[in-house]
């Protein structure tokens, strides 16, 4: 089964506010763009992924992600994250009604294509399936087989909501890169320890050079 991934990207100007407000004063918008580029780049390199549809209202992010090979869809105004994801899934299936569709968070800078492939292979055995984030509270991936509605319920305690909706929880070991989303400096340290993509590494390196305290792991 080949999947189309729907990736939501928030406007960069206010992105990753907790990184901006943290002790290291990290560049949230630059990191958010780097995270999205590394996430989508890794997704496109996954053998289980047919293509990636990015839903965003940010023209800069859209231009960069389109250059990587993603299809960029305008985000409908005022609907929020779940509305954006549902819109993306509908647009994908308007073109290919039999598409297997999965959402993927845009802030997975350590994403490894082989681990994503394992998660999607598992998901293919169920009508709907989801992967919890590293904290065990949220969700980083929600998948819907052909003919099944995605029914996203992201934000906050989405793990419990997706489980309550009847989606099968994916409990694979060894897929840490697919679970490691980044909102805080601690999250970024954990992602750096896993090994991030080149764009995130470059932005984090520039931040350290500019004098921000290093978010890198302590060996």
Image (tube, helix red, strand yellow):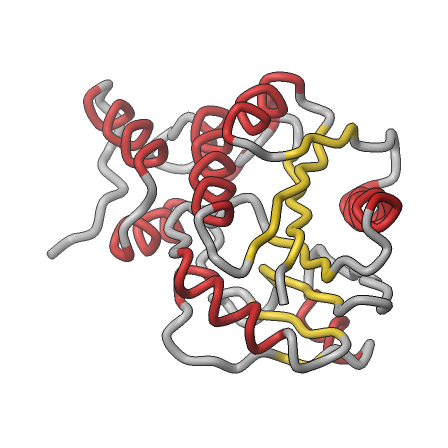
Above or below 133: residue 186: above
Residue 183 seen from this side: no
Residue 138, image quadrant: bottom right
x 32%, y 56%: residue: 190
Residue 68 seen from this side: yes
Above or below 101: residue 166: below
Residue closer to the observer: 136 or 123? 123
Outermost residue, left direction? 219
Residue 113, image quadrant: bottom left
x 69%, y 30%: residue: 72
Residue 91, image quadrant: top right
Quadrant of image for the N terminus:
bottom right
Residue closer to the observer: 20 or 217? 217
x 71%, y 81%: residue: 126
Q: Where residue 199 appears, x then y in whole percent?
A: 35, 31
x 66%, y 17%: residue: 59
**Relative to residue 58, is residue 174 drawn left or right?**
left
Q: How many marks?
A: 0
Residue closer to the observer: 132 or 23? 132
Q: Where residue 94 appears, x then y in whole percent?
A: 88, 45
Quadrant of image for the C terminus:
bottom left
Above or below 154: residue 206: above
Q: Where residue 10 appears, x then y in whole percent?
A: 66, 33
Q: Where residue 53 appears, x then y in whole percent?
A: 68, 41
């Amino acid at each position: 089964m080949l999947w189309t991934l729907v990736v939501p990207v928030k406007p960069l100007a206010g992105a990753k506010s907790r990184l901006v407000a943290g002790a290291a004063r990290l560049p949230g918008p630059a990191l958010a763009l780097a995270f999205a580029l590394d996430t989508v780049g890794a997704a496109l390199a996954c053998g289980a992924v047919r293509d990636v549809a990015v839903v965003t209202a940010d023209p800069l992010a859209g231009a960069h992600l389109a250059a990587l090979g993603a299809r960029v869809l305008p985000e409908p105004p005022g609907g929020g994250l779940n509305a954006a994801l549902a819109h993306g899934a509908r647009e994908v299936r308007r073109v290919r009604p039999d598409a297997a569709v999965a959402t993927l968070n845009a802030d997975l800078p350590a994403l490894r294509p082989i681990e994503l492939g394992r998660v999607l292979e598992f998901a293919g055995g169920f009508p709907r399936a989801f992967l919890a984030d590293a904290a065990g509270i949220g969700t980083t991936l929600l998948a819907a087989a052909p003919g099944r509605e995605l029914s996203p319920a992201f934000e906050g305690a989405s793990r419990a909501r997706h489980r309550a909706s009847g989606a099968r929880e994916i409990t694979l070991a060894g897929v840490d890169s697919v679970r490691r989303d980044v909102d805080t400096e601690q999250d970024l340290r954990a992602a750096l320890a896993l090994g991030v993509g080149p764009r995130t590494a470059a932005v984090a390196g520039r931040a350290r050079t500019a004098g921000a305290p290093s978010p890198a792991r302590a060996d």
